[in-house]
Amino acid sequence: MQIDQTRLTEFATRIFVSAGSREAFASRVAEHLVAANLKGHDSHGVGMIPAYVANIGAGHLKVDAEARVIEDRGAVLLVDGQFGFGQVVGAQATAMAIDRARETGVVCMGVRNCHHLGRIGSYGEQCGQAGMVSVHFVNVVGHGPLVSPFAGRERRMSTNPFCCVVPRGEEPPIVLDMATSAIAQGKVRVAYLKGEAVPEGSLIDHQGLPTTDPGVMFQEPFGSLGPFGAHKGYGLAVMCELLGGALAGQWTAQPARPRESTIVNHMLMIVLDPAAFGGVAGFQAEVSAMVDYLHSTTPAQDADRVRLPGEPEREALARRAAEGIPIDDNSWAGIVKAAGSAGLTTAEIEDLTGWISPDA
Ligand code: NAD
């Protein structure tokens, strides 16, 4: 089915309010999730609602928590997300980092104990839209690991996202935002729910043999995701684990730390004001010239054109804002079930979803 973004946002907001969240936080989370769907990342969109509702019920996700500064050394800040909605505490922490970077030129901020931050690119975009460069190293804990190290066959880390954003004045920022696993775990979940295979080179089974069956991540004997880019992607994943996890969060995926079936992100974020690096005008002029140079590349065979990081998301946004967001039946059933668990009555759910025709 194809779902209109406004109605989907309203439904998601009502689910979180019913689960105990205040309206402002519920709508912020709903908007973030729907924006992830709009940008083509269904792995980090409304399909996360069942996990969030379950984590609220289990006491792992604190719906009222806000970002709290626990160390302030000027250009170095440590913020505790207190297990609040990542979309709320992550955005609050990012706003603090941007404000401070305007004074100090550079800010290095640790943001620890966030419930799932969702699409890390949204915090990068927040920086980019404020004219800042940003770099984000993130680890993922609170549940068992999912990703095997390069040359290993057992899970030792999670999908540890990395993000780097460069502003472009009035133009949209350049946004590199990616899992360091071969594909995001949420994409394995979406493929599993749709009954589809994942791309070759993404997964290994319990014997360390390559497979395209997403079931190995959900049914015993478990396999694992591999890192992207062989030893190089693995190396970046290790740095996300150590900078996001050990430095910012003091909590890595090593087995002495809690694994309670929740999703916790720790993020090390570096925010740089281009004004402190020789001036904005020269920086932006050089960025634009390089962007033009990259765009001028003759496309490879079978490619339509060369894009910059962040462009596929903007193209998806334009398409899905016009056509609606595609949601598969299994994911939709999970969201409707979560709405019931959150406390919405059958009549309320029908009222909120009645606009969806069964064969849409
Ligand atoms: P992806 O592989 O779809 O894209 C990765 C990057 O490559 C993006 O910046 C994209 O713009 C760029 N890109 C894609 N195609 C391109 C092309 N043809 N030309 C130029 N650039 C191109 O992303 P992913 O690795 O599947 O990650 C999906 C999302 O999952 C991200 O938003 C990430 O933050 C999120 N994530 C979150 C967590 C968490 O714990 N919160 C964990 C893992 C991933």
Image: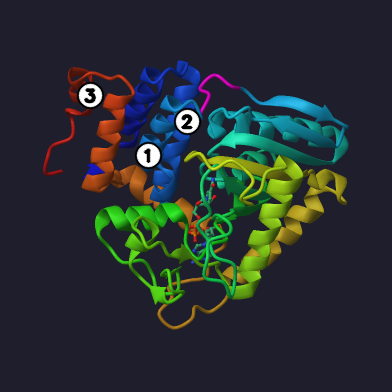
Which residue is labeled 3 in the image? 349
Q: Tell whether position 63 is magenta.
A: yes
Q: Quadrant of residue 123?
A: top right
Whether label 3 lies within 8 Å of ligand 1 gets the answer no
Q: Earlier in the sequence, mark 2 or mark 1?
A: 2
Secondary structure mainly formed by the magenta segment: loop
Instruction: Using the image, determine if residue 253 lies above or below residue 11.
Output: below
Q: CA distance from mark 2 to mark 1?
A: 10 Å
Query: Can the viewer see residue 132?
Result: no
Element assignment for label 3: helix
40 or 189, nearer to the observer = 189
User: Are the residues at dot 2 and dot 1 in contact (C-beta closer than 8 Å)?
Assistant: no
Element marked by disc 2: helix
* Residue that numbered label 2 is attached to: 29
x and y percent of residue 78 in the render? 77, 34
Query: What distance separates the C-alpha of mark 3 from that of mark 2?
Result: 19 Å
Q: Residue at x 54, y 55 (%)?
A: 159
Q: Earlier in the sequence, mark 3 or mark 2?
A: 2
Indicate the quadrant containing the N terminus: top left, top right, bottom left or bottom right. Answer: top left
Regarding mark 1 in the picture, which secondary structure is present there?
helix
Quadrant the C terminus occupies: top left
**Mark closer to the chain start, 1 or 3:** 1
Exactly how many numbered labels are in the figure? 3
Magenta extent: 61-65
Report the amino acid beneath label 2: Val
Other-residue count near label 1 (Cα within 10 Å), few / some / many at <14 / 14–19 / ≥20: many
Residue at the front extreme of this rendering = 256
The reply, left or right, for residue 270 in relation to residue 162 is: right
Task: Find residue 176 and report its horizontal and vertical position in percent.
Answer: 60, 56
Q: Which residue in the protein does label 1 denote?
A: 46
